[in-house]
Amino acid sequence: MIVILKENPDLKQLESFKSWVTEKGISIHESQGTTERILGLVGDTTQIDIDLISALDIVADVRRIQEPYKNANRKFHPNDSIIDVNGVKIGGGNMTLIAGPCSVESREQVCEIAEAVKKSGATLLRGGAFKPRTSPYSFQGLRAEGIEFLLEAKKATGLPIVTEIMDISQLDCFTDVDVIQIGARNMQNFELLRQIGRTNKPILLKRGLSATYEELLMSAEYIMAEGNNQVILCERGIRTFETYTRNTMDVAAVPALKKLSHLPVIVDPSHSGGRYDLVEPLSLAATAAGCDGLIIEVHNDPEHALCDGPQSLRPEAFDALAKKVSRVHAAVNA
Amino acid sequence: MIVILKENPDLKQLESFKSWVTEKGISIHESQGTTERILGLVGDTTQIDIDLISALDIVADVRRIQEPYKNANRKFHPNDSIIDVNGVKIGGGNMTLIAGPCSVESREQVCEIAEAVKKSGATLLRGGAFKPRTSPYSFQGLRAEGIEFLLEAKKATGLPIVTEIMDISQLDCFTDVDVIQIGARNMQNFELLRQIGRTNKPILLKRGLSATYEELLMSAEYIMAEGNNQVILCERGIRTFETYTRNTMDVAAVPALKKLSHLPVIVDPSHSGGRYDLVEPLSLAATAAGCDGLIIEVHNDPEHALCDGPQSLRPEAFDALAKKVSRVHAAVNA
Amino acid sequence: MIVILKENPDLKQLESFKSWVTEKGISIHESQGTTERILGLVGDTTQIDIDLISALDIVADVRRIQEPYKNANRKFHPNDSIIDVNGVKIGGGNMTLIAGPCSVESREQVCEIAEAVKKSGATLLRGGAFKPRTSPYSFQGLRAEGIEFLLEAKKATGLPIVTEIMDISQLDCFTDVDVIQIGARNMQNFELLRQIGRTNKPILLKRGLSATYEELLMSAEYIMAEGNNQVILCERGIRTFETYTRNTMDVAAVPALKKLSHLPVIVDPSHSGGRYDLVEPLSLAATAAGCDGLIIEVHNDPEHALCDGPQSLRPEAFDALAKKVSRVHAAVNA
Amino acid sequence: MIVILKENPDLKQLESFKSWVTEKGISIHESQGTTERILGLVGDTTQIDIDLISALDIVADVRRIQEPYKNANRKFHPNDSIIDVNGVKIGGGNMTLIAGPCSVESREQVCEIAEAVKKSGATLLRGGAFKPRTSPYSFQGLRAEGIEFLLEAKKATGLPIVTEIMDISQLDCFTDVDVIQIGARNMQNFELLRQIGRTNKPILLKRGLSATYEELLMSAEYIMAEGNNQVILCERGIRTFETYTRNTMDVAAVPALKKLSHLPVIVDPSHSGGRYDLVEPLSLAATAAGCDGLIIEVHNDPEHALCDGPQSLRPEAFDALAKKVSRVHAAVNA
């Protein structure tokens, strides 16, 4: 951490600041220029609150050099983390397909889709039971009943399930859920992150709509700081000025997050584009960029399509996509 | 709501869609152009899930004409809502100053600041007890103890208090809190909004870092849909590409939100700019734009300034600011 | 185009508006709801200035249905445009590699790089002669001399050359240049677009840092409206809140622009990421998403790397990349 | 400037870098931490191209401490610059109203508006002759003829005129124009900035739609580096995710730019909001924040409003606004 002092700083405050830093076991290297004076803080600065320092009267600016996350940082864990979900391995060179309906609607719907996506190569089943919706008047999901239907599909197909939690009070419903998803809008719901960090389940953590890589990794750090290291990062599109797509998939997030962190990185091409005709090109792009998996919306009932998102694929399209993904994955890793 | 059909839509699906709409008591006006065919849906379309319609195979595009919020909408409540907080009236031409420390640190600190800001004209006391922090390693606030200190300051000064809740499990601590704040990062924590909507306390709802006016109003609608109409909207700066300021205060939010909604609109100039030298100009700008109040960070202890944000004013600066705010408010309303 | 009228519009103004529209050969379909009244304007509405209509007192809102561009629109030109650059075909299923130095520095440098990238499969040579720089104190390029060096490399290798124009006064230097590039910061320099539209050279048009697809296509339309249809669109990353990468490559722009327009779409992975370690994953992602080509920075002189961008590859890395791109392109189109 | 080296840098490259820096008269202060090694570059670093340094293999990161602009920097010119436009002084505590039509349409229109706004206290006349339009099919302005009409209005009222140039080839038309405006889309048209810097006319430089303060000041620096110091900065709204307003006025730009630079800062509330009902609150907000002037669109012909923007005020509204602005300006400076 580099602290740039104001000109002619109050010397009493400066001494008091130096003592405070040194007491934390951090050493200080000073450098005096013609106009500016710089303190280099050397040691474990993740424990230092950068906002507190920048608030000091004597400080002109503060810059971090080290990343403020430890558990999620590849520097300290050079090897890829591999998350084991009931035998399905995520990360470490594996390419995992997660598929299922946007919203769970009925036992039949979810079981039928589960069978279909399993045949096409998906190894996890996704489905929304608790649904975050912008409007209180929109359908909020089947909630507990939705999770029951997912569990029946799991029993029928053997596919482990991934579904979203919106509040820790819902945790009881998640006893038999295999991967708990934290949605983009809850990425900085710090209380939820902390509490979920005390479970021993894999967590699929989605990037917030305007979050930076560092903020995503800090949210992973909240979970890991409580002892749960099974975090899967998920790029799902960020908000930009473009209105043709719902969000803008940041495909560079894949290699960047994998460089910064040892955690697996998957991509959600369905929400990223918000259009079914973009799911295939975005899936292939994410695969080519080196992602560890894809989470894709699939629906099965064109007659009652009212409850599927405009970004859902039909099973046939998903099957064709899975084959292409496999070819691209092989081409990149040849 | 206007639905633009694709060319040559499947007629069976079209009939099924029309029945579904008509069953909701909404009537349909058709318009046929040379290439496009348009359906105008007339009636209470707030109940219609626009995503479901845009997902239909037969639909090229859907546009809302009516706003998707009802309770928060000025169209249906032309008069300003005035929120009564223990006798302090917010909205309806009143100009309310809310002030206090960023973080509650001690009984003495908060009482001293409370006395000072009361003298300068503040009528509510703010202070952070539960603190949302990007890093799990940063100070997370005094939590329950912080609220106790605020309540002692309330007893000493008579100022009602405003403080942030981060999770509904903390609600027990808020029994004697006068206004519950929902922070920017929780603006779309829909479960929290719903649960807080079942209390009978005024809610100060902060705009999310990348939220639109409509999204903010939809979040207010979540609270109001549960029966709690005492919502105060708060502009606190949005994320932009500018790095000199922490956030960018969107001063147009004040007249825009007041036009769209009957709810009071206050502004947080401290977090908007993130720099103490911007608090005054931003406060005056917000006042001139017609806001109903300001929520400002004030600290009192330059020697131990470590725990105050870089955007905090000292009591003397707050006192000078309050006088200028009062002059500008008078000039605008002369 | 749909015009939503205000309640109780002034009838005289309404009649005057209707006549104005009808005189342009556009017919009007009216639809009357309970509260709103809607006019559907049917015909060639690209000629209508939407801002003028939204300014009318009687108008609540206006929405376009048709895209405001004609020449660039795939609806009116269903087949891919193929741009022929001295025998090199861009678009229509071809995959073109354009490579070369960020800045032209010397005859030797550019010739050496040209030879190298040609061997690896590049079919066009790029190089910056006129350099847009944020600071007036930064190196502004060799300008006319730089173009001479590019032309020598063209003579030596047979590779057609692509280089950027910054002002129409520089056009004389471009007589033997094969493709003229318009940089991101000039995407809405409308006078330059118009003037370049009067040349008969292929134009490589880069997307602006915060431009939408529609704005990019409208800028292409400026060129095409003057008679020059040889426009190549280029995604080069947009500005987002992420600071780890210089820009954020919007890979969805590839399929989206190719759906909206018949023009070829290439991608610049060097400027998109701004980091050499991202050039390969971004190139593969863009290829997998279906782009018609890549424009990549290559430098050759590690000892004097001072004048190469942090995003430049060495020839060996470019060679390896070209092979991978070829494999991914084959896998996607198998 | 602080250069953070990679671990175990190549020593030959390091020495070569150090010589290069030292030759520029800049001295180097080294600081060695446990893992990182830091070089502080001390001296006039505005001449150093930060991109070149960050491209070096041995460099992990580079951060500027000094601002990269000199002529525009308040540090080196502590007093406010006052721009004299034919006797009208802009900056230094003066509050200047600039008003006029969006587009010049006719001699009568512009003269009538000029008379009206002069009566209300405007001291400069604005009007668009060369109009930057997103679509080539939209009205592009009266161009040279429009400037003639402005000059006639100048003759009739004595008001100096401000109008936009889009390309240096238009300069001949600007001989009698008093202030040349550079539009937001041309803020980084560096050739135009350079050429306009060689004139001796005051330049009104608008902030680009996604530009930072530093980028705006670097564009001012381009003009000033050529010898023309008469630059007026103009905040005109930035692009954000909000769609209710056309742009988002960044009112903090006023105090921030005035702190960073000695140049006058004015605000365009018409384009910022894009709605006539926002012009007044945004004008008052900008005034309260300390701007040196406002540039406001006024139209005069409600019957033919087709060519006025939705953000134009009528003369009566402008007159009322001018009085309020005056009261707020007095209140802030009391």
Image (cartoon, coloured by chain):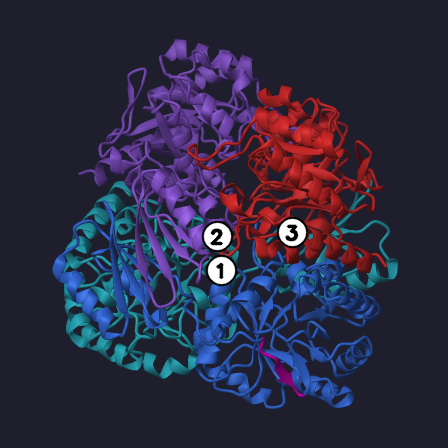
Chain colours: A blue, B cyan, C red, D purple
**Which is more toward the observer, C86 or B226?**
C86
Residue that extends furthest to the front in the rendered view of this protein:
D12
CB within 8 Å, label 2 to label 3 = no
- Say whether residue B24 is left or right of residue A22: right
Between discs 1 and 2, the one toward the N terminus = 1
Residue C177 magenta: no
The CA span between labels 2 and 3 is: 20 Å
Mark 1 lies on residue:
B217
Q: Position of residue A86 (x, y in %)?
A: 67, 88
The chain containing the residue under callout 3 comes to C
Q: Position of residue C190 (x, y in %)?
A: 60, 28
Q: Quadrant of the C terminus of chain D?
A: top left
Q: Amino acid at mark 2?
A: Leu
Point out the stretch of residues depicted in magenta. Answer: A80-86
Task: Look at 68% across and 32% down and name the residue there.
Answer: C153
Residue C108, picture quadrant? top right
Q: Which mark is residue B260?
A: 2
